[in-house]
Image: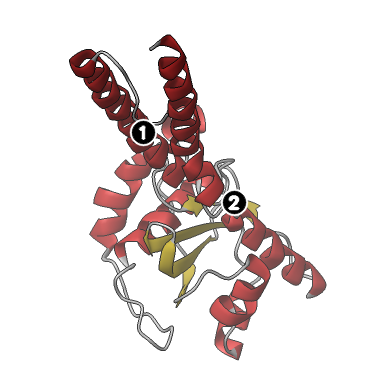
Amino acid sequence: MKVEFLCSFQWISVICSVLLLAPFACSKNHGNAANDLLEIINKNRTSHNRPNLGNNPGLGCIALQYAEQCKNNCTVNNTIHCQPTADDFIEIFAPNCGVELPTFGSISGYILGCQKKYIDPTEAFSKVLVKDHKELSLLMNKTFSEAGVGIVGRHKHNGPYIWCVLFSSNRANSSFVLEDLGKGIEQKRGCYSGSSVDCSKGYKNSAVVINVWMVFFVFVFLFQVFVDTGNLILFC
């Protein structure tokens, strides 16, 4: 019985390892695409002799909230029409992000786009942000000083993906200040610029919690089999 138990325990260890590592192996880890997209925007502004936009985490978090609210509005033609109210920004988005309300500045412009499938930031710049001359002109606006980018998928690991860029003309580092020393919210879905958290980190965390519970129930079940039968032969 001892040999059989050790053999079974080895199999149990393999199964539990697979369950725990699955979310890391299967998750789409694109890094922080929001930071990448803002970097691409700044490179294009530099090529047009425009100043770089500051990467404002508070504005980025609000952009993520914006994208989250509009995630059900993407059409089959990859077009999206969604306009939250001013109250949504102040009463919902800012508190959800932990933005200090006295520092809530003006949002001078925005670009909102969507794609049914995930595309990398370089492709998103041309296919989502700059689809016509009007959007290119907005990106190159000389009065803008800061920007924030938010990206989220409608479903975990599946599209459509919503891309939102918010622009501000406020004095740098004086608006959309995050509480708690700039930590903002604990990211659960998507990602936003100014944060060091990967786009897939929130998905991984939730998947790991679920799989830990699965491992726990596997152990409980097999232990009960061992107690009831006195011999664990399920895997040997």
| Amino acid type indicated by mark 1 | Val
Please tell me whether residue 127 is drawn above or below residue 190 in the rendered image.
Answer: below
Q: Is residue 214 left or right of residue 48?
A: left
| Residue name at image x 50 percent, y 49 percent | 200
Percent position of residue 100, x then y: 38, 37
Crowding near the residue tagged with mark 2, few <14, some 14–19, many ≥20 C-alpha atoms within 10 Å = many
| Residue name at image x 40 percent, y 47 percent | 104
155 or 232: nearer the eye? 232
Residue, far left: 228
Circles 2, 1 touching at the beta carbon (< 8 Å): no
2 vs 1, front mark:
1
Percent position of residue 10, x then y: 49, 24
Please tell me whether residue 122 is drawn above or below residue 182 in the rendered image.
Answer: below
146 or 125: nearer the eye? 125
Residue that numbered label 1 is attached to: 209
Query: Could you say which disc has been placed on residue 32 in the image?
Result: 2
Percent position of residue 136, x then y: 62, 81
What's the CA distance linking mark 2 and mark 1? 22 Å
Please tell me whether residue 197 is drawn above or below residue 17 in the rendered image.
Answer: below
- Which structural element holds mark 1? helix
Quadrant the N terminus occupies: top left
Earlier residue among tags 2 and 1: 2
Q: Is residue 209 left or right of residue 85?
A: right
Rendered image coloring scheme: secondary structure
Please tell me whether residue 121 is drawn above or below residue 101 in the rendered image.
Answer: below
Crowding near the residue tagged with mark 1, few <14, some 14–19, many ≥20 C-alpha atoms within 10 Å = few
101 or 139: nearer the eye? 139
| Amino acid type indicated by mark 2 | Asn
Quick check: can you spot residue 22? yes
Which corner quadrant of the image does residue 40 belong to?
bottom right
Quadrant the C terminus occupies: top left
Quick check: can you spot residue 199? no
